[in-house]
Amino acid sequence: MSKNDIEPAGAQPIWPLAPQQAGGFALPQAWAPQPAGGGLLPGDLNLATLWRVVSEWRWLILGAVAVGLAGAIVITFLTTPLYRAEVMLEINPPTVQAVDESKVTKQAATERDYLATVVGLLQSRSLAERVAQDLNLASNPSFVPMQASRDTRMKVATGRLMGGFVAKPVEGSRLVRMSYVSSSPTLAAQVTNSFADNFINSALERRYEASSYARHFLEKQIAKVKGDLENSERQLVQYAQAQSIINTGTGDASRGNDGTSLQGASLVAMNAALAQAQERRIMAEQAYRNSIRAVNTAEVNQSTAVLRQQRAQLESDYQSKLSTFKADYPDMVRMKATIDALDQEIRKEGGTVSSGQSNTLMMAFRAAAAAEREIQGRVNNLKGQVLDLRARSIQYNILQREVDTARAQYDSLLGRYKDISVAGGLGTNAVSVVDRAEVPGGPFKPNLMLNLLIGLGLGLLGGLGAALALEFLNDTIKTPDDVRDKLHLPSLGVIPMKKGADALADELKDQSSAISEAYFSLRTSLQFTTDNGAPKSLLITSTRAAEGKSSTTLALAQNFARLGNRVLLIDGDLRKPAFVTGLEPDEGLSKLLTNHDSLASHVLNTQYENLALLPCGPLPPNPAELLASPRLKAVLAEALSKYDMVIVDGPPVLGLADAPLLAGACRATLLVVESGRTRTKAALDAITRLKASGGNIVGAVLTKFRARSHGYGYGYGYGYEPYRYGGVGSRDREIKLLAQRES
């Protein structure tokens, strides 16, 4: 029979397990499948991962770099050489001279805004048209096609000039650098110099035209405003004479201040006199009233002092006798009546006011009041006159405002005219040439070294990007870290690829080979999965076919047999058995599951000491039904009673019910994962199915591992490097065992 999944893959030991209680297995406490959208998660990006990706996809990256360099060389040689000529201009912002004859100050315009304006004018279409006309580029056949009309050629020449011309200010200075790019070095220098010359000429022309127009305009405006001012002043004087309005010039009648008229000045003076008269009257009145209060207070105090003394004496006697006599005693009644009479007399004296007052203070108070009333009458009279003047001053104020407005406008126009006359007569230009353009000695494009660097960078970035993209899209299990992080299983071993086409048996005979050492490590790892050592019954399965499952089964069986253990290897794949003996297929697991024969009648000895084989037997039509029968557990129990260890080579998990049934019957299950081929989602689905059937997965072994491709370059240190070996054979190869029936 042929077998597809017989390629093992050797093992580098990983020790993630520790003995557990009561023969338990060291599995993760929390197992949860991870999403398998890609082989590389965003959190996995680190230096080690990047180095692994670079190592694995190095030829892709080198190819991308080579393509980038080749493209840079091709582009360099195919690109037309371009020459650039430059002119340096100095920009001096204009200043305005003002105003005082004894002192001249200068105010500079904002330099940044002025430089931006200059750069905009240099890049304008009108300047490009002047340059095209100056150099007669519309008639140059190497610059524009001659088939079109004159106007069309001029437009084309202007467009080409604007496309190749660049003007930029030099940061932190008043310099502007202009450059023009052309395939002709001579034309580049001519065009750049022409731009500078025509810009200076156009600036002078614009300045002269602007000052000339402004002077003519201001002269007309000044003549008009002067006539308006004279008419306004004449109307103001005539109205003042007609209304008898005389202003003293000490106020502003336009704002309602009547101090500018004679009536207003008199009203202001009388208001001040009225305030003083009111103050004198108030002071006289206050003095008069204070004198009255002082006289009353003295008389009252003198007359009631004796009465209060008498009452106090009687009150003291009354209180002292009250302790001896009652209040209704006649003497006590008379004494109480006397006290009450004194109280009435005291109150009567307190309300009495003396009639003596100061005649002098009263006369002064009356005189002050009369003076106040007289001044108040004069103020009221002046108020009427001022209100009448205000009514007659409305038109006067209107005429006065017209005169003031005309005079201010006239003064402003005179000042502006003077400034323009001074600025227009300076005759200096704000732009000057620092360095004229010369014919370039060589092209500035293409730059071979720059293109090579760009090609190298783009190729490297493209290669790295493609490698990372492929890594993200590739959701396979590649390294022992993937087994632990993505599958949440202990990594019990790493089996490298075997180099050459030798049979697996030949590799396993050489116990110093990388394959043998890897399986030794896997065997040792299995011995630490339980408190009692290796599991007594072990199912070895995989996610899909051709992952090295059967080869791993044979290698483990041999390794445990070398330790002196009696090992039974059961070929549990009832669909595509891997182990063939050459004998008639009358004995095997399929026969044993359908009858009650003893196990010994179906077991065959092999050429390996302490290793026996229970073959598959005839292929049944219903493998899943046979494996689901109670007879399977009975066969395994009988095998465990006669052998130290039973290793079952099961079929792949996905799509079949055989492997989950075998996993539920065996004490432990080992999952074989092919490096770089087994997808994460498929492996997680396989683990879920095995656990759902009651299988106890003790870990996984990674087969066909290419250490150099994944950044694992270490060795054992015994004179050889195990990961230098590749493949473990080819697919579709049977594992032949020299077997014989037990005697």
Image (cartoon, grey):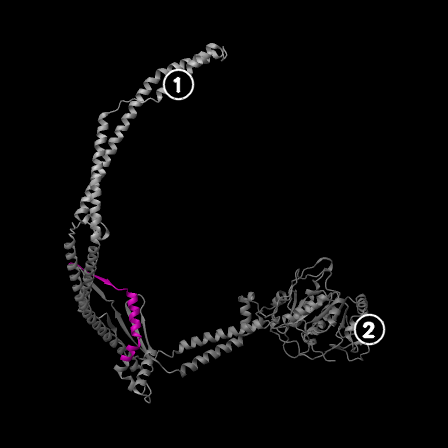
Residue 370 locus on image (x, y percent): 21, 34
Total numbered labels: 2
Q: Which residue is mark 1?
A: 344
Q: Which residue is mark 2?
A: 592
N-terminal label among 1 and 2? 1
564 left or right of 454 in image? right
Most common secondary structure along the magenta stretch: helix
- For the residue marked with disc 2, what is the amino acid? Leu
Instruction: Tell me if residue 164 comes above or below residue 714 in the rendering.
Output: below
- For the residue marked with disc 1, what is the amino acid? Gln
Q: Nearer the viewer, residue 45 or 587?
A: 45
Magenta includes 121? Answer: yes
In contact (CB < 8 Å): disc 1 and disc 2: no
Residue 514 locus on image (x, y percent): 64, 72
Instruction: Tell me if residue 399 comes above or below residue 620 in the rendering.
Output: above
- Crowding near pointer 2: few (<14 within 10 Å), some, many (20+)? many
Q: Quadrant of the N terminus?
A: bottom right
Label for residue 536? Answer: none
Q: Residue at x 21, y 32 (%)?
A: 367
Residue 81 locus on image (x, y percent): 36, 82
What are the residue bounds of the magenta stretch? 101-130
Q: Quadrant of the C terminus?
A: bottom right
Mark 1 residue element? helix
65 left or right of 272 in image? right
Residue 450 locus on image (x, y percent): 40, 76
